Amino acid sequence: MTLMILSSIAAGIIIGMLTHPFWIQNFATLFIDIGTILLLIMVGISIGLNSSVFEQIKSIGLKLLLMPLAVVVGSIGGAAIGGYLVGLPFNEAGAVGAGQGFYTITSIILATHSNQLSTIGFIANLTRELASFIFIPVIAKKLGYLETIAPAGSTSIASALPIISRSTDAETVVIAFITGVICTALVPVLIPLILNL
Amino acid sequence: MGVRFVMYLAAIATGVLFGLKSSQNNFIIKNRNIIQIVVLLSLLFIMGIKIGMDDAVIQSFVAIGYKAVLIGVFAILGSLLAVISIKRFIRGGDVK
């Protein structure tokens, strides 16, 4: 899947560089808006189909919501600090951080703001996903189980979940999944909000 | 962006309600993975074209990449510190 994603973007970049199809400018934003909405409906359907998540939240208690809150606030705050070091406005860097590893949606939403920020959003969040694959087993051993959910962010609902499962215990997997669901739902909501700051 | 925020929120809420209410035999539910992949790859292709047409982005790709990796690393560190600071509220005194 990652290869297909990278190939699509690479093919688009090469065609854009070689042919400069300016007619696409007229409808690209509309196309991105419609496509993003379709994609988010599909994300919502996946959440709705896993309705047991809502019962699991009840059984562990509301304190569980501290996890996604910490992941979101930490991601945005950390990215804003990183952005400050490289001269990026805090709202733009914060919006990139709000992607929490969900690099596809993040870069697509940021493309409606600027191409440069969309590229940063893609690379930063892809880096986060790849780094989480490498570091989750190390973090589980050296720091603790719950900490493995931090680098995974929204990917703890998908690609990072098998690695978390292999490195931690069953309760952590449930917490990771719920955190991933909430973080994923928050990505498209937070990015436009933070960009507006 | 304010309008987009509302549209995105409404899209997710619509999806959640649809997922909760629909049966597994529904056409969209059954084919949601393929729909998702087709839409996603098309969007990324269009996004790639937009980036490819932007000479400023292409010319500064390495500089942008370095900034992006640094922001990604700081996002990980920030979330890690935040989770460490709230961990005890979730699992009490557990070591793990």
Image (cartoon, coloured by chain):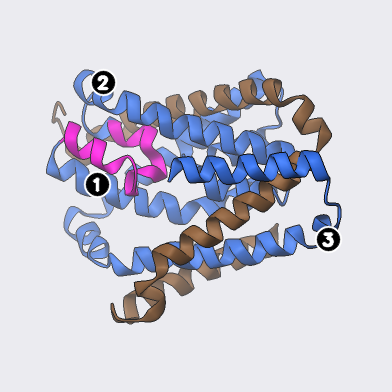
Chain colours: A blue, B brown
Q: Which residue is mark 2?
A: A138
**Which mark, by number, is residue A187?**
none
Question: Magenta residues, as a range?
Answer: A148-168
- Measure how far apart labels 3 and 1 are at the Cα level: 44 Å
Tell me the residue at 61%/67% (across/down): B7
Q: Quadrant of residue A170?
A: top left
**Which mark, by number, is residue A26?**
3
Q: Main secondary structure of the magenta part?
A: helix
Is residue A158 located in the magenta-colored stretch of the structure? yes
Q: Which residue is mark 1?
A: A175
Q: Quadrant of residue B52?
A: top right
Q: Which amino acid, mark 2?
A: Val
First reached walking from the N terminus: tag 1 or tag 2: 2
Q: Which amino acid, mark 3?
A: Asn
Q: Quadrant of the C terminus of chain A?
A: top right
Measured as percent of width and height from the top left, residue A134 is found at 34, 25
Chain ID, mark 1:
A
Q: Is residue A197 visible?
A: no
Give the secondary structure at mark 1. helix
